[in-house]
Amino acid sequence: MTTVDLGLPVRGGLDLVPTAEDVQKAKDYASDQEVRWCPGCGDYAVLAAVRSFLPTLSIKRENTVFVSGIGCSSRFPYYLDTYGMHSIHGRAPAIATGLAVSRPDLSVFVVTGDGDALSIGGNHLIHALRRNVNMTILLFNNRIYGLTKGQYSPTSEVGKVTKSTPMGSLDHPFNPVSLALGAEATFVGRAMDSDRAGLTAVLEAAAKHRGASLVEIYQDCPIFNDGSFDVLRKPDESESRVIQVTHGQPITFGTDGRWAVVRRGFGLAVAPIAEVDPADVVVHDATDHELAFALSRLSDQALDHAVFGVLRQVQRPTYDDLTRAQVEQAVTAADAAGGPDLHGLLHGADTWTIAGR
């Protein structure tokens, strides 16, 4: 998969280019901690992809931070030789927001899972996206609670039999990409753990984006939900299901592009390329919000189709930039009026004396 430069600014830390002596390799991002996930877990593939693309960003390790919540994926910070924090359940976006606002020199990543992000953390997730906080969110979706041993999650299919739903889940699942687009995230993508090239390309594009970026990663849990995405991995099945999108390119897929995404009324549909007018084939535009949402709706719980790549990428002022500008405006106004030393208060010691008391 290829990505297209849309001429957008880059995120924090990317302007702090290392010298030749500081150039890093993938092995430099491996910590001294033993990686402890179950054999066959998709997290291994994601970790390898992250380690491989981080050096391409030319960000010093001391300007890189990974914040996680609770879950199997949340062990991520231990396995990277960067700064990191294993925080509390569902609150990683809130903690990452504080970092992004207070430290513009940092490139901030959040690692979370479908349970951590979409259940107890759902409120924090949507508001981080809505505010366009300068962070990259990697949402590992295995459609199950893995760390707590196999209960259904907010992305489990209707009818899913688990330890907590012995008669089948009654909950309609979230579509994380649709949710992120509904919150008006400025970057939304999807990738699969087994597609190393596609995963790396989407993660790299997300990391370079200035603003809130979310990448949903379909990831296998071999212990409690093995084979949940197998229909997208097997060549005979993926042929008519996996849809890769690239900005500026017609959306065709399958061997020799035998299938196409076309407009049907106010929505989209999939049809054999031989049966449609070439003019009806949709050309992907990552700046088109409505198109991105319509593409996200092609992906359903039955996985008849699944769209991968960068669905949306646009530019909007970031919450952290606006916050810092507002603080600076207040400090400047106070100084001009001969008021209190707000800069000294904000950046001074932890204690102070109130005059006249």
Image (cartoon, rainbow, N blue to C red):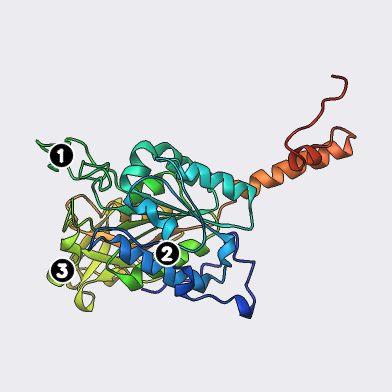
Mark 1 sits on what residue? 163
At label 3, which amino acid type do we have?
Lys
CA neighbours of label 1 inside 10 A, class few (<14), some (14 to 19), many (20+): few
- Element class at badge 3: loop
Badge number at residue 203: 2
**Badge 3: how crowded within 10 Å, few (<14), some, or many (20+)?**
few
Q: Amino acid at mark 1?
A: Lys
Three-letter amino acid code at disc 2? Leu
Q: Residue at x 42, y 72 (%)?
A: 52
Sequence order check, earlier mark of 3 and 1: 1
- Quadrant in the picture for the C terminus: top right
Q: Residue at x 22, y 44 (%)?
A: 149
Residue farthest toward the top in the current orientation of the protein: 357
Q: CA distance from mark 3 to mark 2?
A: 23 Å
Quick check: 17 left or right of 153?
right
Taking the spot 75% from the left edge, 44% from the top edge, the residue there is 328
Q: Quadrant of the N terminus?
A: bottom left
Where's residue 85, x and y in %? 49, 50
Check residue 234 in the rendering and tell me which mark sits there, or answer none. 3
